[in-house]
Amino acid sequence: MVASSVAQAYDVTDSLSIGGVVAATGQCQSLSDDAGEDDDCKGAMAIQPEISLRPGENDEFFMKLGYGVGNGLNNSSPFAFSTFAADLEDDVKDINGRDRDYLLTAWYKHTLTFDDGSLGLTFGIVDSADYLDQSTYANDEFTQFLNQAFVNSRSNEFPAYDAGAALQWERGNWSVNVVGMSVGKNEDDNEFLYAGTQIGYRTNSSWGDGTIRLTIAGTNDRFGNPNGTDDDERRLEAVITLDQAFGDYWGAFARVGIQSDDPAIVYESIITAGLAAQGGLWGRPSDNVGIALGYLDGGNQQVDRTRVFETYYRLAINDRLALTGDIQWLRDDSAISSAEDAAGWVFGLRLAAGF
């Protein structure tokens, strides 16, 4: 089973291509009486054009822009997670405190090829999630799950859209990705350094293709501690991601992540798992459907634990346009005895187009 992708590319010349995605969502939340927020319906749109220039077979210049219209439920939801994980209006302005708007990534990559593998070197403005914590079935908020919990491991923070470099090595069934970044600002308004490595191994069995990925990452000591003193701490984190196809149409994933609790963190660990199916099973090969569950153990802040459920059906209208119906259930248990727990349903539609 191959995951769907909404990203499209138009070849202007042999070396120049343009593409991108536009995704609009409408979501309504129905909350418990003690959730602290009102039932509400909000919409948002994310627009991400891309341009790629390949002056030679082994060289690529790439740039991705991001624009947002509205913030959806992000500013009215009581939950720690975003119910639509895309970069929306507030996310694409003053990115990482760099006084930079709308420019998400801009990098140059050179690839060395060998008889049995390749080595890619990338420099510029990068996104660590392009290299770490990858998943075949739970990694794309435009074609798969919408909730943050099922896009990347939310026990860990993967910085995006800042200065860095990456290395991608592949040989046979093995792959290694390494990324390092200098990030302008974290939640403590501190600039920090970040480094991570993902080791992957592809398997092939009578069931189908599978992948095992181990991501280990960390920062320097620029994060505040839970006691609120001046002693800053470093973040250390690890994630294991498993993907497994079952025949031509079914697939499953699981993530297990953990991070150190020396700095102030919202979540210490995460376990998510889910199933996906490709529409060829019922005569619509471009459709896909998914269902997932997540459990997160709180860190040293206000959330004691979080449980998340999501299911979606993505209906391909044509080669470029797809409509998704989505249902989520979330519950945040408070770590503060005097505070109320938040629980509720979120119902939504996503219309996404590749261009």
Image (cartoon, rainbow, N blue to C red):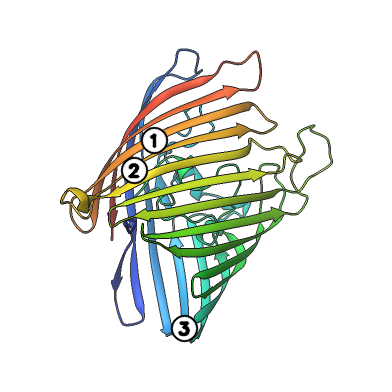
In the picture, the quarter occupied by the C terminus is: bottom left
Rendered position, 160 above or below 145: below
User: Is mark 2 in CB contact (under 8 Å) with mark 1?
Assistant: yes
Residue 135 in picture, x, y percent from top left: 46, 54
Residue placed most toward the observer, 157 or 171:
171
Left or right position of 237 against 95: right
Residue 257 in picture, x, y percent from top left: 59, 45
Residue 310: mark in rendering: 1
How many marks do you count on the picture? 3
**Residue 347 quadrant:** top left
Residue placed most toward the observer, 338 or 155:
155
Residue 203 in picture, x, y percent from top left: 45, 63
In the rendered structure, which amino acid carries the disc numbered 1?
Glu
| Real-space Cα separation, disc 3 to disc 2, in angstroms | 36 Å
Residue lying at the far left of the rendered structure: 283
Left or right position of 290 against 253: left
Q: Secondary structure at mark 3?
A: loop
Mark 2 vs 1, N-terminal side: 2
Residue placed most toward the observer, 264 or 188:
264
User: Is mark 3 in CB contact (under 8 Å) with mark 2?
Assistant: no
Residue 290: mark in rendering: 2
Q: Which residue is mark 3?
A: 58
Left or right position of 220 against 69: right
Q: Secondary structure at mark 1?
A: strand
What residue is shown at x 21% (from left), y 53% (from top)? 280
Residue lying at the far front of the rendered structure: 206
| Real-space Cα separation, disc 2 to disc 1, in angstroms | 8 Å
Q: Secondary structure at mark 2?
A: strand
**Residue 351 quadrant:** top left
What residue is shown at x 84% (from left), y 41% (from top)? 231
Mark 3 vs 2, N-terminal side: 3
